[in-house]
Image: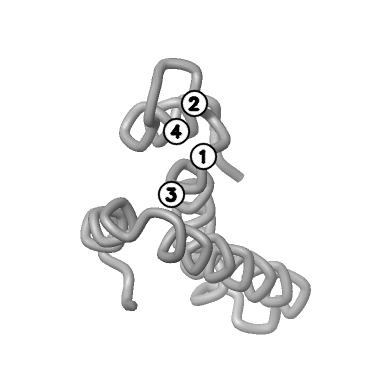
Amino acid sequence: MLTKRVKSRIIGEHKKHDKDTGSAEVQIAMISRQVDELADHLKKNPKDNHSRRGLLKMVSRRRKLLSYLKKTEPGSYDKLIKKLDLKR
């Protein structure tokens, strides 16, 4: 679970304009942070299958958003991949 401070920092780094909170870039960055935190949790708690299912759903959602971004804005996609250090 992300705190308000972490969310606002992520939004500030990835927003397109002042009131941007829902663009694909922001959503991908938020999901990536949640995936990282949940992956750390699952390393400590390997039998937590409910959280593992949630992780798989988040990864799927991020993949769909990334494919959308790649189709609509390829330049922004490349920048985001490099910034978040994700595989293609």
Compared across the picture, whether 54 is left or right of 31 comes to: right
Query: Of marks 2 and 4, which one's residue comes earlier in the chain?
Result: 4
Query: Of marks 4 and 1, which one's residue comes earlier in the chain?
Result: 4
Query: Of marks 4 and 3, which one's residue comes earlier in the chain?
Result: 4
Residue lying farthest to the bottom in this orientation: 47
Residue lying farthest to the right in this orientation: 50
Front tag of 2 and 3: 2
Residue indicated by mark 4: 6
Question: x, y percentage for residue 4?
Answer: 54, 26
Q: What kind of element bears circle 1?
A: loop
Q: CA distance from mark 2 to mark 3?
A: 13 Å
Q: Nearer the viewer, residue 73 or 62?
A: 73
Residue indicated by mark 1: 23
Q: Residues within 10 Å of mark 3 (few under 14, many from 20)?
A: many
Front tag of 4 and 3: 3
Question: What amino acid is labelled 2 in the image?
Answer: Asp
- Disc 1 vs disc 2: Cβ atoms closer than 8 Å? yes
Q: Where on the picture, by quarter, is residue 17?
A: top left
Residue indicated by mark 2: 20
Q: CA distance from mark 4 to mark 3?
A: 11 Å
Q: CA distance from mark 1 to mark 2?
A: 6 Å
Front tag of 2 and 4: 2
Which residue is depicted at the point 61% across and 45% down?
Answer: 1
Residue indicated by mark 3: 29
Q: Residues within 10 Å of mark 1 (few under 14, many from 20)?
A: some
